[in-house]
Amino acid sequence: MTKTIQVITLGCSKNTVDTEHLLAQLPSAVSGSDGNSLSFRVLPEDSEEYADYLLVNTCGFIGDAKEESVNTVLEAAARKKRGGAGKLYVFGCLSQRYGSELPSLIPEVDAWFGARELDPVVKALGVEPREGLRTHRRIGRKAPYAYLKISEGCDRRCSYCAIPLIRGAHRSVPIEKLVEEATLLAGQGVKELILIAQDTTYYGLDIYRRRALADLLKALSAVDGIEWIRIHYSYPEGFPEDVLKEIADNPKICKYLDIPLQHISDKVLKNMHRGVDGEWTRNLIKRFRREIPGVVLRTTVIVGHPGEGPEEFSELLDFAADARFERLGAFRYSEEEGTWGAANLEDDVPEEEKQRRYDSLMSLQAGISADFNASRVGSTETVLVDEVLDKGGTGSPARLIARSQYESPEVDGEIIVTLPSGTDPESLAGKFIKVRISAAGDYDLLAEYLPE
């Protein structure tokens, strides 16, 4: 018996990994819990084909994400009502957070599951979870990179963040399990690993009683087929010195670091419960620049947090202008129920002022990003080809979408590579190639392929 299954995944890359682990428990032919033969055919996420099982992996982090998740579940429920799906299951952060309220509001959903354990979802599909498949992933997209979730949950209590409420306490995945998972990913053609967690630098404290991210980096670097390793979501407090050395000295570690700083004002950082102050943060950034020559830094900040007045926001703008982060993203503060901030701080910045501050900061950052990109024009760089953009034809060249070590997928700009006439673009997909940067915009770059 063959069943069709479709999973719509919302939210961050951590949810993407969860979906891939879930689908790996459903290979093309498995033994059902009733002892009968059962197989699954996975439909693309945007498919309109009838799905025996329609699953929505939700996000419940901030207001906009919750709204998107609710709307997607409502659309899925309407699809089921029209006869476009058999069973509708919802799991992930939204249902973990509001599992007691949602069933009565959307009764069309057949079952709700949380975010901390996938086994109940697998069992609801009629399959007994298999321990031997815990490190397996089924990657639906054709891309040479994959996210590697090195831990789950978080022990920190930042004022604005609901993740500890949703995902629970910090739990590291043992190094040997991650190496096994990375090896399997390499076997699927993955060449770049992007390490993710709520706080990657906290890795190991629970199971090894010390910060072990540098040890993990060394172990992953030994996996055949993995050529790039990129670090995301590094918390600034307690940043391990040995990780800086590993980034600087290990040729497989991208000279790129994602470190969400959130703010620079002492007052706001204290309100956020970040555990550091502005001077400490400035010195940390200087240390990164000094100890990892040529490093590209990505950060995120929050504007409009309680306590951020005009003076504090002006300090944040000055900091962004001085630090010149090659990559910077921003969020407008939204009060999240259950968090320390919601219980103890007044959301005292009007929404229109939050938007004004956001626009002002991102306008500044656009110029900084444009300057960084412009400095690369004329240089030769090694890039990884993510996909074919245009196969070319009469009068138009073939083009590729690629990234250097200085661009992370989905959050940073892209490098659009033009190929000479007669070059087969498909033969370069998923490979490392040399290009010359020919033009630059605020975020994206243009380049020309340099055949070996």
Image: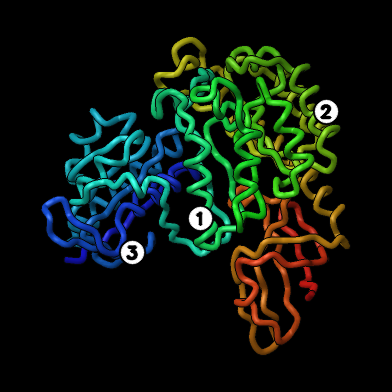
- C-alpha separation, residue under disc 3 versus residue under disc 1: 21 Å
The residue where tag 2 is placed is 286
In the image, residue 50 above or below residue 343: below
Residue at 86%, 59% (x, y): give it: 377
Rendered-image quadrant of the C terminus: bottom right
Q: Position of residue 222 (x, y in %)?
A: 63, 48
Does dot 2 land on a helix, a strand or a loop?
helix
Residues 255 and 109: in front is 255
Disc 1 residue type (three-letter): Leu
Q: Can you see residue 331?
A: yes
> Are the residues at dot 2 and dot 1 in contact (C-beta closer than 8 Å)?
no
Q: Residue at x 80, y 52 (%)?
A: 373
* The quarter of the displayed image where residue 35 is located: bottom left
Q: CA distance from mark 3 to mark 2?
A: 48 Å
How many residues crowd mark 3 within 10 Å: few (<14), some (14–19), many (20+)?
Answer: some
Q: Which residue is mark 1?
A: 185
Nearer-N-terminus badge (3/2)? 3
Q: Secondary structure at mark 3?
A: loop
Query: Crowding at label 1, few (<14), some or many (≥20) Cα neighbours within 10 Å?
Result: many
Q: Residue at x 64, y 18 (%)?
A: 308
Q: Where does the image place residue 32, in percent across and percent down from the top left?
A: 17, 55
Labelled disc at residue 43? 3
**Residue 375: x, y in percent?**
87, 52
> Which residue occupies 63% across, 34% down?
215
